[in-house]
Amino acid sequence: MEKTCLAVCPHDCPDTCSMAVTVRDGRAVDLRGDPNHAFTQGYLCMKVARYHERVYHPERLQFPQVRVGPKGQGLFRRVSWDEAIALIADRFRDIAASTDGPQAILPYSYAGTMGQLQSNSLDRRFFHRLGASLLDRTICATAGAAGCDITLGTRAVFDPETVVRSRYIINWGSNTVVTNMHLWTLMHQARKAGARIVTIDPYRCKTAEKSDWWLPIRPGTDAALALGLMHILWRDNLQDDDYLQRYCLGVEQLRERALQEYGPEKVAAITGLPAGDIERLAHEYAEHSPACIRLNYGLQRHGGGGMAVRTITCLPAVIGAWRHPGGGALLSTSKLYAWNLAKLERPDLIPPGTRTINMVQLAEALNGELPGPPVRALCVYNANPAAVCPDQAKVLQGLKRDDLFTVVHEQFQTDTADYADVLLPATTQLEHFDLHGSYGHLCVQVNEPAIAPLYEAKPNTEVFRLLAKAMHFEPELFTATDEQLAAEALQANGTVGLAKGTFDGITLERLKREGPVRLNVPVDYAPFVEGGFPTPSGKCEFYSERLAQRGLDPLPTYTPPHEDPQTRPELAARFPLQMLSPPAPSFLNSTFVNVQSLRQAADEPLVELHAQDAAQRGIRNGQWVRVFNDRGGFRAKAVVRDSVQRGVAVTLGIWWNKYAADGVNCNTTTSSRLTDLGGGATFFDNLVEVQALEGEQA
Ligand SMILES: Nc1nc2c(c(=O)[nH]1)N[C@H]1C(S)=C(S)[C@@H](COP(=O)(O)OP(=O)(O)OC[C@H]3O[C@@H](n4cnc5c(=O)[nH]c(N)nc54)[C@H](O)[C@@H]3O)O[C@H]1N2
Ligand SMILES: Nc1nc2c(c(=O)[nH]1)N[C@H]1C(S)=C(S)[C@@H](COP(=O)(O)OP(=O)(O)OC[C@H]3O[C@@H](n4cnc5c(=O)[nH]c(N)nc54)[C@H](O)[C@@H]3O)O[C@H]1N2
Ligand SMILES: [Mo]
C-alpha cells in the first residue's frame, strides 16, 4: 500500500515548506518539497530533507517517564499515560489551592512547531482556565515587531514573491541563504535580471559571501547607519518629496535630525564602515528602483534593536520605495493572517490581574527574582530552554531546584528533558494534524497526518485534553477535535488592518481538497503604494506620539548596545570582543542537533576570530579555546579567518549542552537584559574574552 500526503514543515522558519510525503505500508519512506507550491518550488533544506531520519530516530521518546535520579542527569522510569497525567494534575491542583495560587505555575513554550493547533490552541485554553502565569513569548521577534509597529503600524511587509522584480536588494541582518533559502532563490532570479545584492552584517555569513557587496557593520549600530543614509538622501536631494508629503508624519523633524546629527564621518566612527561606503550605499539605494530591504532578526538582538528596526523601516518611505511591487521592506508576513485567536486560545478565560513573565527572564523567574509568587511548577513544550535561553548557568541552577516541579513534553531527550520530573513523548509533524500560516509567504496550508503516532507519543492538543479532564475542567472547552479547532481558527474574527478579509473563501474543506491556498490578497501585493499605513495617524510615522507618551524619543535615534566598547570601555577592557551567536546552517535553533549527519556538518562548537585578535592572544587556527565573561563560559574550537572584523567574534549555535565539549553552550555567556522596545532578547549584545587552552590542539 503506497500513498502520498501533503504535509507542512513545522519549524520556526519563514519558508513554511509544503512537503509531499510518500507512505508505504504505514511508514514514511520519502519526503520532498512540493513542486506545486509557489514558494517551496519542489525543494527542501538540508535539515528537513532529513525529517524522516528525525521521525524514526532511535532516540525518540517512546512512553511517559518519571524522574528517578538527580535533576539534570536524565534518569527516568517508565510509567503509563494515566499515571503521568494523574501525577501532573495532582501537583497542579495542590499548587493552585495553596497560598501561592495558580500563578505559581508557568507554561513555557515557543516555536518547536509553528502549527496553529500544536503551538497555540488548547494549551493556551488550559493555562488560561487554570489561572497560571502568562508567558510573554519574546525570545525571537518582539523587538522588531514593536519597532515596525511604531513606524508602520504593522510588520514591514510586501509579497515576498515580488522580490524577483527588485533591482536593489539589501539583506540587513538577514542570513537569507540559510534562514530563508527559498527567498534567496528569488533574489538570485532578480540578480540574473540585473539586481544588485548587498548584505549588511558584522559576519561574513553565507549570504554575505554570495552577495555583490558585504558591508561589515559594527554590531548593534544599524540605526546609526540608517540615519546616516537619510542624511545623505536629504543632503543630495534623493528623497521622494511627493511620497513624504502625502503619506508620512514628522518629515521635517526627521530630516533635521538626520542632517544635523548623523553626518557620514560620525556614522563611520559609530558603525566602523568607511564614510565613502556609506555615501555609495545611499546613492545606489536611491538610484536603483525597486529597492527592497529584507531585514531580519540579527540586528534586533541588541539593546537598541527595537529602535534600529523602527529607524530602518523609515527608509523606504524616504525614497518612495513602497510605490513599486518589489520595493519597500520585508520583515514578516505573519500579520496578514486573520487567525481567530479569541476562539482558539480563549483569552477571556484569563483571571483579571494575572501576571505575565517574560520568557527571556526564565533565569530570574526560576530564581525568585520577579514580583509575585515563586514559580513552583514549569510546563515545557515546543521549547528547549536549557539550551536556548540566555544566562544559562542561572537557568540551569533554577531547573535544578528540588522544590520545582517540571513537566516536559518532547520528541527527544533534550537538555531541558534531563531536568523533567515528568517527561512525556510528543508526536512529530508526520503523526499529527495541523494548520499553518507563514511568516515568509502568503499561503495557508493543512498538515495531514501521514502516519499513525509512533510508540505512545501524543500531540500537544491531546495532552491538554487529558490534563483538562483530569482537572475536571468544563468538558465543552476541551473536547473539540483538532479539525474542529482548525475550523474555528479560520472563522471570521472581525479583524481590521491588513488582515481584513484575507481568509475570505478559505475553509478547512477547501484546504484539504486543494492543498496550499494563497491568502485573499492581490497578485503582486504591495500594501503601501498609496500610503494607508495602519498607524494611529494613518501615515508612516517618523514622529511617534505613542513613543512621546511613553517618555521615549519620538524620533528615530541610535541607541548603543548594552555592552558596547564605545560606551562601556571599562567592561570592554576585560571583555573586548563583541560576540554574535547566530544559528548554524545545519541546525534549526537547537532542533536537529541530535541528528548525527547534521551535527557532523556543524563540526564542533566553533568561534571565529580575526587573525589579529587571535595572534594577540596566542591562538592558532583549530586550537581549543575558552570563551567567557562574568556570566559564564564555554569551550570552542578557534577558527581564524577573515569572516569578522577586529573586535568581533562569532560562534554558530545552538548546540545541545550535552553534545558540547564541556556540557554547556554559548548561552552561558549571553545576557537576559531586554531590548529597548518589545522586551526582546539581546543574544548578540554580548562582550566576551577568548583564551587559548594550553596544549589543546584539536
Ligand atoms: N537553517 C536555519 N534557518 C533558520 C533558523 C535556524 O536556526 N537555522 N532559525 C529560524 C529562526 S527561529 C529565526 S528567528 C530566523 C532568523 O533569521 P536571521 O535573522 O536571518 O538569522 P540570524 O542568523 O540569527 O541573523 C542574521 C544575521 O544577522 C547578523 N547580525 C548579528 N548582529 C547584527 C547587527 O548588529 N547588525 C546587523 N546588520 N547584522 C547582525 C548575524 O551575523 C547573522 O548573519 O531564521 C529561521 N531560519
Ligand atoms: N545564543 C543564541 N540563542 C538563541 C538564538 C540565537 O540566535 N543565539 N535564537 C533564539 C531564537 S531566534 C529562537 S526562536 C529560540 C528558539 O528556541 P526554541 O523555540 O526552544 O527552539 P528549539 O531549540 O528548536 O526547540 C524546540 C523544541 O520543540 C520540540 N518540538 C517540536 N515539535 C514539537 C511538538 O509538536 N510538540 C512538543 N511537545 N515539542 C515539540 C523540539 O523537539 C525541540 O526540542 O532560541 C533563541 N536562542
Ligand atoms: Mo527565532
Image (tube, rainbow, N blue to C red):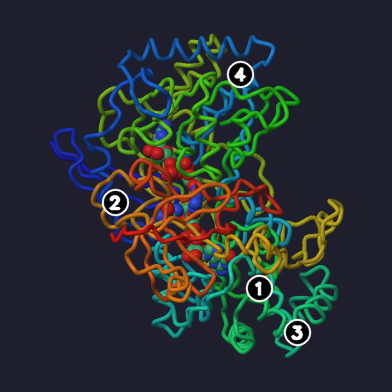
Image location (x, y in percent) of residue 132? 62, 23
Q: Which of marks 2 and 3 is nearer the N terminus?
A: 3
Q: Which of 515 and 373 is in front in this view?
A: 373
- Residue type of the residue flagged with mark 4: Leu
Label 4 sits on a secondary structure element that is helix
**Marks 2 and 4: which is nearer the front?**
2
Q: Is residue 268 visible?
A: yes
Q: Which mark is residue 316?
A: 1
**Marks 2 and 1: which is nearer the front?**
2
**Marks 4 and 1: which is nearer the front?**
4
- Residue type of the residue flagged with mark 3: Trp
Figure quarter occupied by ligand 2: top left
Label 3 sits on a secondary structure element that is helix
Q: Which of 143 and 44 is in front in this view?
A: 143
Image location (x, y in percent) of residue 44? 31, 56
Q: Which residue is drawn at 55% across and 15% down?
A: 92
Label 1 sits on a secondary structure element that is helix
Q: Which of marks 1 and 3 is nearer the N terminus?
A: 3
Q: Is residue 665 above or below residue 464?
A: below
- Residue type of the residue flagged with mark 1: Pro
- Residue type of the residue flagged with mark 2: Arg
Q: Mark 4 points at which residue?
A: 130
Q: Name the residue under label 2.
A: 599
Q: Nearer the viewer, residue 528 or 657?
A: 657
The quarter of the rendered structure image containing the C terminus is bottom left
